[in-house]
C-alpha cells in the first residue's frame, strides 16, 4: 500500500522542535533497550510503537505507557508525526522500513545488522541523503567514555602506529536461540555469527583503527543446524598497515569479547562481554615510553559505560542541537563492508580489498560457502 506523504518539516523555526518525537518499529527483545534508554533521555519523547504481533505490541505499549499503537509501519507513519524512527525488526525488513521512514521525513536509528547486503544499505544511505535526514546504525560498543578516550589517543598519534590487533567475539548460543524463524538463514538473517555477533567488535576495532584495506577469511559450521557459519577466522588489514586477527563464534562456553591493539608505544586491551566500562580496559606503555607521557594515557574521571543509553544520549544531544547525527555513528556502512569482504573472501578463496567491493556482484545478498565441520559431515555448497 502506498505510504502517506511526509508531513511538513517539524521545526520551530530556529531548530528542531524539542522534545523530538520518536517511535519504535518492532517490539521484541532489543526494543526494550531502546525504550528504556529513551524514557530516561532529555529532549525526546517516545510516542508510539508498531508491531504486527499484537501480543508483543500490547505488552510493550503498556510497559512504556505509549499512546500510539499500530500493527504496521504504514499505519504508524499515517497516524503519527514523528522525528525519529527506531527500527528494531529482523534485518530483512530494515532497508524498506528505513527508506519509508526517510520518505516521511524522519531520522532513522536502525539496529545492526543494518541490512542484508551492501546494495540494500546503499539504498538506505541514498534515501537519507535525499531526504536530508540522518541514519544511525546501532553499534553501541563504540559509545562510552573509554572508547572515546582510546580513539582520541590513537588519533592523536601519542600511542604511535598501530601494528597488530586481536578481535575476538567468543559468545555462546544454543539451539533454542536459532529456533527463532528469522535466525540462521542467509535470506532472513543475512549471515551467521560474523554478521550478527562479531560485527559489534569488528565495528569497534574499525572505529578505533580507521579505514580498512583488505580481508581474507574462512567460515566454518562446527555445531549448529543452520545455513550460516557458527565460527569464522579472518585476517583484516587496515590502511594504517595494522593487521588484525579476527575470530567470531557462538561456540564458546566461557563467553568474552576481546580486543587487543599493539601500537609502537603501547598495548591496549579490552575484555568484556556485551558492554564495557573503564575497568574493562587496560593501557600498558612500552618500556621506552617516559613516565610523564604514559601518565597522560588515562581514562577520564567521569565514566560513561558503553550501551544503548550512551549511544542514544549522543544521538539525541546532536539531533536536538540541530547538528544531525553525531560523529560516534559515522561510517554506517563500514562494518557491513568488512563482513561482506569476509564472506566474499571465504567464497572466492582470495583476499578481498575495499576497492573490490565497488563490484556490484559483491554488493548483493551475502552467502557462504561454509566449511562443514559437523561430525555428520553434511555437504555445504554455496547457499543459493
Ligand atoms: N545491538 C544489540 O546489541 C542487539 C541485540 C539484540 C538484537 N539486535 C538486533 O535487533 C534486531 C531485532 O532483534 P530482536 O532480538 O529484538 O528480535 P525479536 O525477534 O525479539 O523481535 C523482533 C520484533 O519485530 C517484530 N516485527 C517483525 N516484522 C515486523 C514488521 N514488518 N514491522 C514491525 N514489527 C515487526 C516482531 O513481531 C518482533 O516483535 C535484529 O536486527 C538484531 O540483530 C541488536
Image (cartoon, grey):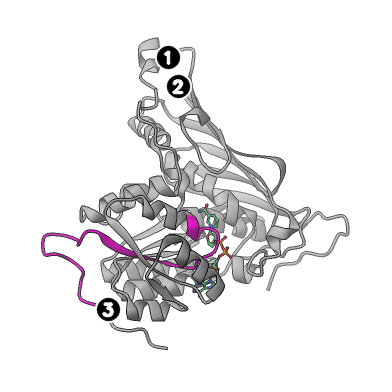
Residue 330 image point, x, y percent: 36, 51
Please, which residue is most extreme toward the right here? 376
Q: Residue at x 42, y 74 (%)?
A: 69
Residue 166 seen: no
Side (left or right) of 73 relative to 107 = right
- Whole-angstrom CA distance, mark 2 to mark 3, is 53 Å
> Is the magenta region chiefly helix, strand or loop?
loop
* Residue bearing the label numbered 3: 6
Which residue is label 2 attached to? 265
Q: Give whichever of 365, 215 is nearer the camera.
A: 365
Q: Is residue 309 above or below residue 370?
A: above
What are the residue bounds of the magenta stretch? 6-32
Q: CA distance from mark 2 to mark 1?
A: 7 Å
x and y, in percent, of residue 95 in the image = 45, 71
- Of marks 1 and 3, the one in the foreground: 3
Determine the secondary structure under disc 1.
Answer: loop
Amino acid at each position: 500500500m502506498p505510504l502517506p506523504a511526509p508531513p511538513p518539516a517539524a521545526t520551530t523555526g530556529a531548530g528542531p522542535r524539542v522534545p523530538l518525537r520518536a517511535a519504535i518499529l518492532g517490539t521484541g527483545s532489543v526494543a526494550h533497550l531502546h525504550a528504556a534508554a529513551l524514557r530516561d533521555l532529555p529532549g525526546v519523547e517516545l510516542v508510539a510503537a508498531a508491531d504486527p504481533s499484537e501480543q508483543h505490541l500490547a505488552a510493550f505499549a503498556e510497559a512504556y505507557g505509549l499512546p500510539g499503537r499500530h500493527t504496521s509501519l504504514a499505519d504508524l507513519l499515517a497516524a503519527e508525526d514523528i522525528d525519529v524512527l527506531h527500527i528494531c525488526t529482523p534485518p530483512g525488513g530494515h532497508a524498506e522500513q528505513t527508506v519509508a521512514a526517510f520518505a516521511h521525513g524522519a531520522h532513522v536509528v536502525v539496529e545492526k545488522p543494518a541490512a542484508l547486503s551492501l546494495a540494500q544499505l546503499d539504498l538506505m544511505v541514498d534515501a537519507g541523503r535525499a531526504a536530508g535526514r540522518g541514519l544511525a546504525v546501532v553499534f553501541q560498543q563504540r559509545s562510552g567514555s573509554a572508547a572515546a578516550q582510546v580513539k582520541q589517543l590513537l588519533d592523536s598519534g601519542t600511542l604511535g602506529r598501530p601494528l597488530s590487533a586481536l578481535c575476538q567475539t567468543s559468545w555462546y548460543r544454543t539451539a533454542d536461540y536459532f529456533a527463532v524463524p528469522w535466525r540462521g538463514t542467509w535470506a532472513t538473517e543475512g549471515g551467521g555469527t560474523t554478521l550478527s555477533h562479531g560485527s559489534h567488535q569488528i565495528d569497534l576495532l574499525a572505529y578505533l583503527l580507521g579505514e580498512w584495506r583488505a580481508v581474507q577469511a574462512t567460515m566454518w559450521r562446527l555445531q549448529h543446524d543452520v545455513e550460516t557459519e557458527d565460527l569464522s577466522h579472518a585476517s583484516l588489514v587496515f590502511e594504517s598497515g595494522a593487521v588484525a586477527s579476527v575470530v567470531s563464534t557462538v561456540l564458546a562456553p566461557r563467553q568474552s569479547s576481546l580486543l587487543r591493539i599493539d601500537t609502537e608505544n603501547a598495548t591496549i586491551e579490552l575484555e568484556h562481554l556485551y558492554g564495557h566500562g573503564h575497568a574493562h580496559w587496560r593501557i600498558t606503555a612500552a618500556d621506552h615510553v617516559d613516565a610523564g607521557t604514559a601518565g597522560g594515557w588515562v581514562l577520564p574521571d567521569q565514566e560513561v559505560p558503553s550501551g544503548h543509553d550512551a549511544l542514544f544520549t549522543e544521538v539525541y544531544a546532536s539531533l536536538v542541537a540541530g547538528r544531525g547525527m553525531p560523529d560516534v555513528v559515522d561510517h554506517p556502512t563500514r562494518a557491513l563492508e568488512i563482513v561482506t569482504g569476509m564472506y566474499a573472501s571465504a567464497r572466492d578463496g582470495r583476499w578481498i580489498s575495499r576497492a573490490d567491493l565497488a563490484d556490484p556482484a559483491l554488493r548483493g545478498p551475502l552467502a557462504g560457502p561454509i566449511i562443514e565441520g559437523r561430525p555428520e559431515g553434511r555437504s555445504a555448497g554455496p547457499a543459493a
